[in-house]
Image: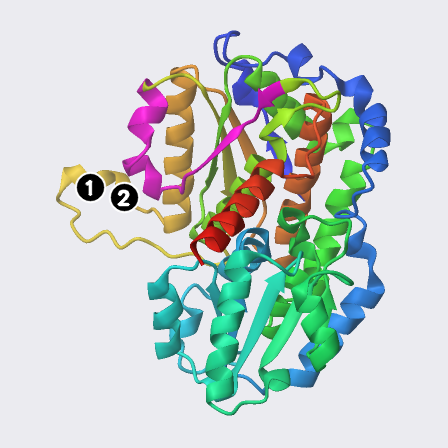
Amino acid sequence: MIKLDVKHLGKIDARHGLSEKELRVNADQIAEFLEKFKKREQGFHEVVDNKQMLKEVHAFGDEVKGKYEDIVLLGIGGSALGTICLQQSLKHLYENELEDREYPQLHAVDNIDPSLISEIQDVINFEKTLFLVVSKSGGTPETLAEYFYFRDLCEEKGLDIKEHFVFITDPKKGLLRKVANEEGIRAFDVPGNVGGRFSVLTNVSLIPAKLIGIDIDAILEGAREAKESFLNTNFDQNLPFQLANIQYSLDKKGKFLNVLIPYSHKLIRFSDWYRQLLAESIGKAFNDLGKKVNTGLTPINALGATDQHSQNQLYNEGPNDKFFMFIKINDFGKTIQIPYLHPNEESANFLRNIDFRQLIHTEMHGTIHSLVRNDRPVLVIEIERIDAKTLGTLIMFFKCATAFLGELYEINAFNQPGVELSKQLTKKLLLDNS
């Protein structure tokens, strides 16, 4: 389970940190917030109990096992970021370079950059490739463009489209669903009450995860644990609310930039996923009453220990407008001792009898202490290890915290009118230029 270490928030100047009393402010509103959340009819937390969905994913994965060498994901934003996160976090970091692989390689074509579109063709065998076309609406411009392009290539090669394309989309609406119904292309549902950025624990990411050998049962098991915490009205047991309350309270003190710093290379794509979740959910022009508020928290990605050497100067001595969330991993699953090759060199004495786990933990603590010394608010999110169950817990934890943030700000955390406006204007410009 996740542990929250909040002690550093009380160690800094009161203008920038939070006292014990401030940490518990709004605690008596949890039940009220949960009732408001229910009225929004969102199902991101309920989908983890959908046994039929899980059964269908397993059945499909078992059916096509050994059939494909490459899986190409065509999608953007929430249709891809969760899957990329699962792959980076739970597979070998050099999976695609391994010679003896049990599962297909997964390639996410999550942009319409012509270089990305063209160069993916140099590393796949079309006859052994499955294209997963992911769009909740079934009409995302970027995803449709990719689908049209790769389907055309497959048709030129004489391939059976039904054998090489699977759609993951709305159960009833959109072009992808229409094509699937008319042509018999296999299609899986994206639940109507689960938005794209909240959809990582649905078919959107569970299908590709299953195909590349990730334990999706364990992911959902971990997610259910965080769900139980989310629905608990006891402040001490509700970790998602605790995080949301800290973010909200620190925003009131001018900390509107939220820096997520996992001290693990496997979680850098988790930060990418969270960046969308926070930005699209909380950045809103109007509140529930229709009042213009232009509220929001700006997410920033950093990676420990890499970004100690690229961002720390700003964080320690720049504007004090940031809240820092560190993710600490206790057990990396292996111990790698650092050889002490120059015992007569005093300048390297600090590496004597040290392994890499100790080094990265010590560097994290050193970074935290420097921030605290400069009155920067810091929270440490501690997990035991990075495995499927823990990642499921972490994903649901952040989604639930974001849902609570929406209620604290009195906004709808589940729509994205700014994104929709951009889509509409893009389509208009394309039509005007066609």
Q: Position of residue 293 (x, y in %)?
A: 62, 18
- Element type at mark 2: helix
Q: Nearer the viewer, residue 182 or 262?
A: 182
User: How many marks do you count on the picture?
Assistant: 2
The answer to whether any part of residue 84 appears in the image is: no
Residue depicted at x 74% and y 17%: 26
Where 164 sits versus 272, above or below? below
The answer to whether any part of residue 316 appears in the image is: yes
Q: Position of residue 111 (x, y in %)?
A: 44, 58
In this rendering, would 417 be left or right of 95?
Answer: right
Residue depicted at x 42% and y 80%: 124
In this rendering, would 44 be left or right of 259?
Answer: right
Q: Nearer the viewer, residue 63 or 341?
A: 63
- Element type at mark 1: helix
Name the image quarter holding the C terminus: bottom left
Where 372 sits versus 115, above or below? above
Label 2 – label 1 distance at C-alpha: 6 Å
Q: Which mark is residue 351?
A: 2
In this picture the colour scheme is rainbow
Mark 2 and mark 1 residues within 8 Å of each other at the beta carbon: yes
Residue 334 on the magenta segment: no
Highlighted magenta segment, given as a residue range: 293-317
Q: Which mark is residue 348?
A: 1
Q: Amino acid at mark 1?
A: Ala
